[in-house]
Amino acid sequence: MSTPYPQSGFTLLEVLIALAIVSVALAASVRALGISANGAQAMQQRSLALQAAENRLTELRLMRSFPVPGRKTEPCPQGPLPFVCEQQFQTTVNGNFRLATVRARLADGPVLAELNGLLSSLP
């Protein structure tokens, strides 16, 4: 005895399994998108921190500054971010030069960029 209408379509179990697979794939996609957005923000912060450090070192050179050895911290905002630049000055073997290290970071955050350069007392 055969049925008058052949059965076609999906069973409830097949539909539930397909929905579970799709939901796992969507969850993985959302997670990857979130990680990508965080990575882009971190890259922007590091890039702006490097620019802030470069600007500070360039300012020191243009002012013909020859600071005494030690540390100094001052604000060095770049774009929308309020960076703080920590400057460390050290003597070198040649007394006409100072080694300047500039570290840029957000307040109470990790160092995002570090730049070294020489400052000269020579004209």
Image: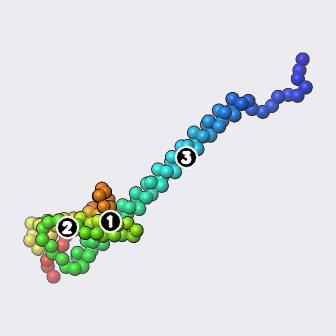
Q: Mark 1 points at which residue?
A: 83
- What amino acid does circle 2 point to? Lys
- What amino acid does circle 3 point to? Ser
- Circle 2 or circle 3, nearest the eye: 2
> Mark 1 Cα within 10 Å, few/some/many (few <14, many 20+)?
many
Q: Above or below — where is 13 with respect to 1?
A: below
Q: What secondary structure is marked by label 1? A: strand
Q: Are marks 1 and 2 in contact (CB under 8 Å)?
A: no
Along the polypeptide, which appears first: circle 3 or circle 1? 3
At horizontal 62% and vertical 40% (from top left) the residue drawn is: 22
Q: Name the residue under label 2.
A: 72
At horizontal 49% and vertical 51% (from top left) the residue drawn is: 34
Give the Cα separation between the discs numbered 3 and 1: 33 Å
Q: Above or below — where is 61 with respect to 28?
A: below
Residue in the foreground of this view, choosing between 31 and 119: 31
Q: What secondary structure is marked by label 2? A: strand
Q: Is residue 51 visible?
A: no
Q: Residue 49's spot in the image, x, y percent?
A: 34, 64
The numbered dot on residue 29 is 3
At horizontal 34% and vertical 66% (from top left) the residue drawn is: 82
Along the polypeptide, which appears first: circle 2 or circle 3? 3
Location of the N terminus by quadrant is top right
